[in-house]
Image (cartoon, rainbow, N blue to C red):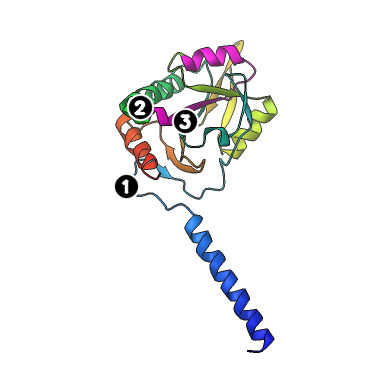
Amino acid sequence: MPPINRFLRIITTVLIGCLILYGCSRPATLTNIHGRDLTGAEFGRDFSLDGTDGARHTLSDFRDKVVLVFFGFTQCPDICPTALLRAANVKKMLGKDGQRLQVLFITVDPERDSAQLLGNYVNAFDPTFLGLYGSLQETRQTAEEFKVYYQKIPTGSSYTMDHTALSYLYDTAGRLRIALSHTQTDKEYVQDIRKILALD
C-alpha cells in the first residue's frame, strides 16, 4: 500500500473513532418530561461562589448528586419561598432518593443577603439546602452564565428584585439537563428528577 494511502487510512480510522467516542460521550436527550430539555446546552456550565457553609463551591463539589439550582433573594415575597418550599416537599416525596438531591439557592441580592441571613433563610426550609453568594460582579457573571435575568426595582426608600423564576436540574455528572418551571407541580418535579436519577 502506498505511504499516502496508508496515511489517509490511519487518519480516517482516527476520525471515525473520535466521532464514535463523541457520540457515546454525549448524553441522550430526554423524553416524556414536564420541564424543558436542556441537554447539551452551552450555558449554565459552572459557577464559583461562596457557600453559607463557609466554603467556596463549584458544580464539581456536588458530583454524584442531582443538583437543583434556583436564583432568588431572601426578601422575595412569594416566588422564592414557594420554590424552596416546593424543593423541600419534593425531597420528602423522593423518599430515600431525596438524599441524592442537593438544592442550591443563589442570591441575586448580595448587597443585603449576608452569609448568615442567607444560611438561616435556606435552612429554614431544609437543613441540607445550601445558599450561595458572591460579589456584585460574581453575581452578574454567574447570572449571565445561566442566562438568568435579574434587576433591582426601587420601592419607596428601598428596593425589590425582579428575576427569572426557573429551577435548573443537573445530572450526577454535573451536566445541565432540565429547566423546571415555577408553574409545575411538586409531583411533576419529582417525576422529572426521577428521570435524571434513573440515568445512573
State which region is magenta. Answer: 98-123
Q: Amino acid at mark 2?
A: Val
Mark 1 — residue? Answer: 32
Closer to the camera, 95 or 90?
A: 95
Instruction: Name the side, left or right, on which 191 lies relative to 64.
Output: left
Q: Where does residue 43 sit, x and y in percent of width and height? A: 57, 44
- Is 113 within the magenta? yes
Closer to the camera, 115 or 2?
A: 2
Closer to the camera, 75 or 24?
A: 24
Above or below residue 26? Residue 11 is below
Taking the spot 32% from the left edge, 27% from the top edge, the residue there is 95
Mark 3 — residue? Answer: 165
Closer to the camera, 174 or 125?
A: 174
CB atoms of marks 1 and 3 within 8 Å: no
Instruction: Name the side, left or right, on which 194 lies relative to 23.
Output: left
Classify 10 Å Cα crowding around label 3: few (below 14), some (14-19), many (20 and above).
some
Taking the spot 63% from the left edge, 89% from the top edge, the residue there is 1
Residue 94 tag number: none
Above or below residue 52? Residue 197 is below
Q: Secondary structure at mark 2?
A: helix
Residue 90 tag number: 2
Instruction: Name the side, left or right, on which 90 lies relative to 23.
Output: left
Q: Amino acid at mark 1?
A: Asn
Q: Where does residue 192 sit, x and y in percent of width and height? A: 36, 39
Classify 10 Å Cα crowding around label 2: few (below 14), some (14-19), many (20 and above).
many
Q: Amino acid at mark 3?
A: Ala
